[in-house]
Every structure is written in structure tokens, then in C-alpha cells.
Image (cartoon, helix red, strand yellow):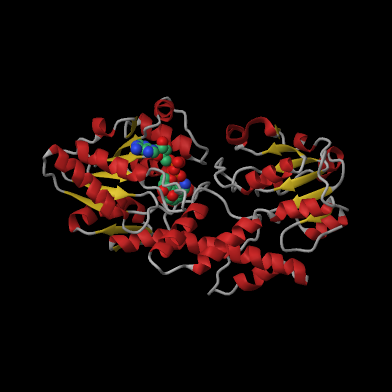
Amino acid sequence: MKIAIVGTGYVGLVSGTCFAETGVNVVCVDIDTTKIENLKNGIIPIYEPGLEALVTKNAEKGRLTFSTNLCDVIEDCQAVFIAVGTPPDEDGSADLKYVTAVASEVGKCMNDYLVVVTKSTVPIGTANKVKEAVQKSLNERGVNIPFDVASNPEFLKEGDAINDFLKPDRIVIGTESEKAEDVMRRLYKPFLLNNHPIYFMDIPSAEMTKYAANSMLATKISFMNDMANLCEIVGADINSVRKGIGSDSRIGSKFLYAGAGYGGSCFPKDVKALIKTSQEKGHVLSILQAVEDVNDRQKTVMFKKISNHYKGNLTGKKFALWGLSFKPQTDDMREAPSLVLIDALLKAGAEVVVNDPVAIEECHRRIGDVVKYSENQYEALDDADALIVITEWSEYRNPSWKVMEKMLKEKVIFDGRNIYEPEDMKIWNWTYYSIGRAIVK
Ligand SMILES: NC(=O)c1ccc[n+]([C@@H]2O[C@H](COP(=O)([O-])OP(=O)(O)OC[C@H]3O[C@@H](n4cnc5c(N)ncnc54)[C@H](O)[C@@H]3O)[C@@H](O)[C@H]2O)c1
């Protein structure tokens, strides 16, 4: 079986590599020539645990190849997956220009039946736009070649993407023909051996499922963050509350951690896009508007704590900031809370020295030399007034407190991910701020 995956980012590269791992002949296509050249030379454009080894292995076996031109490689493909970006437009709706550009390209060069599969996260109704774009190109060529469209939203998590793809909680596929269903079933069969479910449904339901899933997860986070802020006011501890509610099987224990707000390439843009769809359709999802508002506010909570501690005067203060990526195990900084905090600290006249296990290069690409970079988490503390933790990388969880004490000017920590225990901080005489828990002084 041969397929093409167009868009070789987090989703396209991981999906393509994992399909190749099952023996499928996969061509990953991207318009970014540097990315494709690098991949041909074994250089992986993103940090994703386990990905490099799997790409190398499948490329060496000849099952995984890379190209900048879909038309050069489309021959014999049974499916073309569209996995390009769908960034928010100015009004918050998903910008579909990359998706439809690929669909037009497919129509320009396909020569035989294939399934055009949307893997990008796209608003309800996009499959129809894809169908129209492919058909328009075919019409312009004056040819009549049958094809089907399908929706196959992706649920992988950055940082654990390979595992998620190889052992999915579920696979969701929207189709409107048995032929397309058959192609998709054959492709995914190797991933279903341990009873991972595959759900076939109509295309609008598949498209909606992805937005509903991300919106539900974002809602859980904003709910807990808002609860955390109230906990601080009423003297409750959000971690105890989390345990108390998480043991209720109707609620579940996952995704209940309070923090400095959600970021990443998916939750912020998908929540925005679904709000936009709901507005356009005249059924406003006010619950999601609240989720977004709470998250925007939550990204400023750490700065407020810091500013309050220093009585509003941060001029000349120096902060060590641990963690840049929007979550651990990735170098992705799209919509990362760290960026909002850095910006606020700099505007307030503070100096910031940052450390991250993998995202320093990405941070430098985004904001340049407005902060200082430290490859060593302890050196970042040198002569700093306080430590701020904004991403919960595991190497920050159990640090050398003796070294930290020596390096910092004062024993002050602002913990945006609740990774330390207030009881320990009290015993060891640290001033400790966290989220949804009492201040330790
Ligand atoms: N990142 C995630 O964790 C995740 C998870 C599930 C779903 N998604 C969705 O998957 C889609 C892709 O996300 P991503 O994070 O992989 O994006 P990304 O930005 O990492 O990658 C997108 C790639 O598409 C390429 N591209 C754009 N236009 C192209 C064209 N016409 N032809 C060929 N290549 C083109 C870009 O050069 C880029 O390499 C988005 O819709 C996203 O919402 C992402």
C-alpha cells in the first residue's frame, strides 16, 4: 500500500512514520524545502521523543521518503492525507487556505481513484470544501477520475505522540463510501490489534469529534484553574480538592491539574475556532467563551503573584525562569504561557534568564536576545532574585536545593505548575508561591 502525507509537521511526520512502521510505503510531502532536505539527511525538524530513531529506521528500509512535490509522488497512492496547519484567521476561525491548496494540488495530478483524507483539525463542513477543490482541479483538466473524501482527526499528544499513534485510545473516521472505509480500515488495522476501537461515522460528526474533544479538555483545565484561584481566596488547597473530586469515576482523575494556563498549537486555536463556528451558526457556546477568558486571565496569574511580592516594583530585578515549552517533552512554544510571562516581566523592567531542556533554540528563534539563555538549570539561578517554574519538566521536580540556595539571592520560588510541596518549602525556609494553595513565607 502507498500513501502520501502532505504537511510534515508534528502530525504529518509522526503519522507518516508510524504508518511506515506497519510496512506501508509513505511519502511525506512539505513545501518547506529546508525541512525536506534536512529530513532526507536524517535531521528531524522537531523534538519528539522516539521520533528520530523511528524515522531513521523506516527511511533506511526505504518505506519512508520525503518530497517537496506531491505530483512527483502521487502515482499509485491509495490515500493522500492532508496534515497541514490550520492556524486561526484574524477572526478566530480556522484558516483553511493550506488545506484547500493541497486539495487543489491533488486534483491537478491524481490519475487514479484515491481517498483524500483530512487529518488537520478542520471546521465542520471542510470535507465538502476539499471535495470541491479537488473536483475543480479535475474539471480544469477536463478529466473524470473518481475519488472520495474522508475525515480522520488526529488525537496524538505532543511529547507522547508516537505512543499515542501506535496505541491510540480510539481512531475516528468519517466517510461517505464503503470504498473509502475499506482503504482506511486496511491502513489502520495494524493499530487495532490490542482492541483499540475504531469508530466509523459520518464526516461532520468526525470533524466535530475533534473539536469537542479538545474543547472538553480545555474546559477541564480552565475549570480547575478557576477553582484554584477561588481556593486561594477561601483558604482551600486545589491539590486536595483535585484528589477529592478525581476519585469520583464520573469525573475521572486526569487533566485536573491547576497551573499557569494552557497553551500549545491546539487548545487555544481549536477553542477559538469552535466558538467562531457556534457564533456563525447562531448557537453561541458561551461555556467555551468562558474557558477562553479564564485561560487568558490564568496566563497573567504568575506575573501578578510576582509583582505583588515585590510591591509592584520589578525594575532591576532578575528572575531565573525554568521551562519555556508549553508543556514538557516538546520544544513547541506556540501560545506558551512562558511567552506571556516573559513579556510582562520585561515590560516591568526585570531581567530574565531562561532554561529549558529542549526549547532554548525555539525560544531564541521567537524572541531573540531579549532574555539571557542558560543551558544549565542551576547557572540560570546565578544572582537571580527568585526562581519561576512555568513548565513541569521532570528534571525540575527534584532539584539540588543546596545548589539553588547558594545561587539565588533570596530563597523565593514562584511555581506555576505546583511541582513542589508547600510542607517541604516551609521546613526548608523558602518563600513559596504556587497555584491554588496558600503562600508559604
Ligand atoms: N500538533 C499537535 O499536537 C496536533 C494534534 C492533533 C491535530 N493537530 C492538527 O494537525 C494539523 C497540523 O498540525 P501540526 O502541529 O503538525 O502543524 P505544523 O505547523 O507542525 O506542520 C504543518 C506543516 O504543513 C506544511 N505545509 C503548509 N502548507 C503546505 C502545502 N500546501 N503543501 C505541503 N506542506 C504544507 C508546513 O510547511 C508545515 O511543515 C493542524 O490542523 C493541527 O490543529 C495537531
Quadrant of the rendered image containing residue 141: top left
- The answer to whether any part of residue 419 appears in the image is no
Instruction: Name above or below for residue 306 compared with residue 349.
Output: below
Quadrant of the rendered image containing residue 417: bottom right
Instruction: Name above or below for residue 386 compared with residue 28.
Output: below
Q: Residue 217's x, y, as percent?
A: 52, 61
**Residue placed most toward the observer, 174 or 65:** 174
91 to the left or right of 97: right
Instruction: Name above or below for residue 328 compared with residue 59.
Output: below
| Residue visible at 26% across and 47% down in the picture | 116
Q: Residue 24's x, y, as percent?
A: 29, 41
159 to the left or right of 360: left
**Residue placed most toward the observer, 371 or 35:** 371
Quadrant field for ligand 1: top left
| Residue visible at 58% across and 32% down in the picture | 365
State which quarter of the image contains the N terminus: top left
Q: Residue 333's x, y, as percent?
A: 57, 43
Quadrant of the rendered image containing residue 230: bottom right
**Residue placed most toward the observer, 97 or 75:** 97
| Residue visible at 34% across and 60% down in the picture | 206
Q: Residue 89's x, y, as percent?
A: 44, 48
